[in-house]
Amino acid sequence: MIDKINGLLSEIENLKASKVEDIEALRIKYLSKKGEISTLMNDFRNVAADQKREVGMKLNELKEKAQNQINLLKESLENSQEGDQSIDLTRTAAPIVLGTRHPISIVRKEICDIFRRLGFSIAEGPEIEDDWHVFSSLNFAEDHPARDMQDTFFIARSPEIVLRTHTSSVQTRVMEKQEPPIRIICPGRVYRNEAISYRAHCFFHQVEALYIDKNVSFADLKQALLFVAKELFGAETKIRLRPSYFPFTEPSAEMDISCNICGGKGCPFCKHTGWVEILGCGMVDPNVLENCGIDSKVYTGYALGMGIERITNLKYRVKDLRMFSENDIRFLDQFESAY
Ligand code: DAH
């Protein structure tokens, strides 16, 4: 046994390894449960009693040496890797590929910036809303179809909690808290229970604008609309207002812009009319002001709401709405913005 131990001792002193795997193989060979040293340890009980002391000491020495040698090999391998000459530290760094802004974010910012130049500030509200802020305060009749299950995602029934179907809910939130003058722009995501197709989605984005003060008139609304349209689509853009109906505005209108694709001459995009619809607007209904604690005899105001996807489609000619939420890098990569 002593001879065997001495043999292993000199073997271990000369161990060499150039790879992590080799060191691991040596560890298994000598130190694992079934390795050479453990086997000797097991045989120790058969050693004659008068030799036990000497053999025991030798065995311990062997085990310690094996452990040390393997640790040394590991250390020297690590040190040699640190100084690896094959790494060229002077090489130019690989370029970091920057992502792009999402087209909806680009257009949302553009719209908000235009309104900010008119003195509007940003207001936000929750996407999960109660019936009061989405419908009742905005003068929706009890049986208005927009409250219907087909349009609205309900979260709870009583009290009624919904995913907001429009950003007009933020109007109410602000009017309840703030005294006029109020001049806000509210960008945000909205939800409607629609079958998903190239032209409709169950969530999309809107920007709402609200201006309340003394003596605000429809003429102010028209002027703001013209300014926004020209800023968004170019100085030659014309606008047209058509009478419409929204529960929260009276009178209400829808605004068309001269088709920015054919310049108003008529093309398949504008269905040969020369005009495309881009937003809804109107004078805030006195009932809505009163619902929010604002004296409708003293104050008037206008509101407007537009879909960001629609504006983005007009600017970038995206034909399929679903592209906006699919996160396809090939699509997103095509949009560049300075911000
Ligand atoms: N909330 C309307 C919608 O989702 C859009 C809208 C129309 C907002 C007219 C307004 C408005 O503020 O005056 O379709």
Image (cartoon, grey):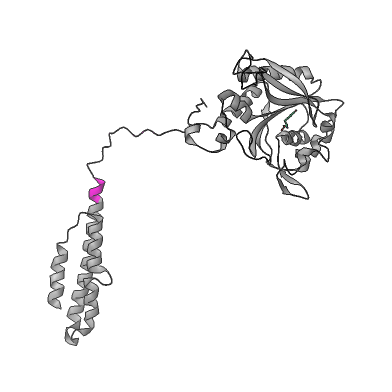
The residue lying at 37 percent from left, 33 percent from top is: 95
Quadrant in the picture for residue 237: top right
Near-viewer residue (33 or 134): 134
SS assignment for the magenta stretch, majority: loop
- Expressed as whole percent of the image width and height from the top left, the position of residue 196 reads 62, 39
Q: Is residue 97 left or right of residue 22?
A: right
The residue lying at 21 percent from left, 78 percent from top is: 56
- Expressed as whole percent of the image width and height from the top left, the position of residue 135 reads 78, 38
- Expressed as whole percent of the image width and height from the top left, the position of residue 289 reads 82, 31
Q: Is residue 175 left or right of residue 35?
A: right
Rendered position, 105 above or below 78: above
Quadrant in the picture for residue 146: top right
| In magenta segment, residue 184 | no
Near-viewer residue (71 or 29): 29
Rendered position, 47 above or below 319: below
Q: How many marks?
A: 0
The residue lying at 14 percent from left, 62 percent from top is: 14
| In magenta segment, residue 89 | yes
- Expressed as whole percent of the image width and height from the top left, the position of residue 187 reads 65, 32
Quadrant in the picture for residue 131: top right
For the N terminus, the image quarter is bottom left
Q: Is residue 117 left or right of residue 76?
A: right
The residue lying at 62 percent from left, 30 percent from top is: 309
Rendered position, 96 above or below 279: below
Residue, far bottom: 49
Residue 317 appears in the figure: yes
Residue, far right: 297
Query: Where ligand 1 lies, by quadrant?
Result: top right
Highlighted magenta segment, given as a residue range: 79-98
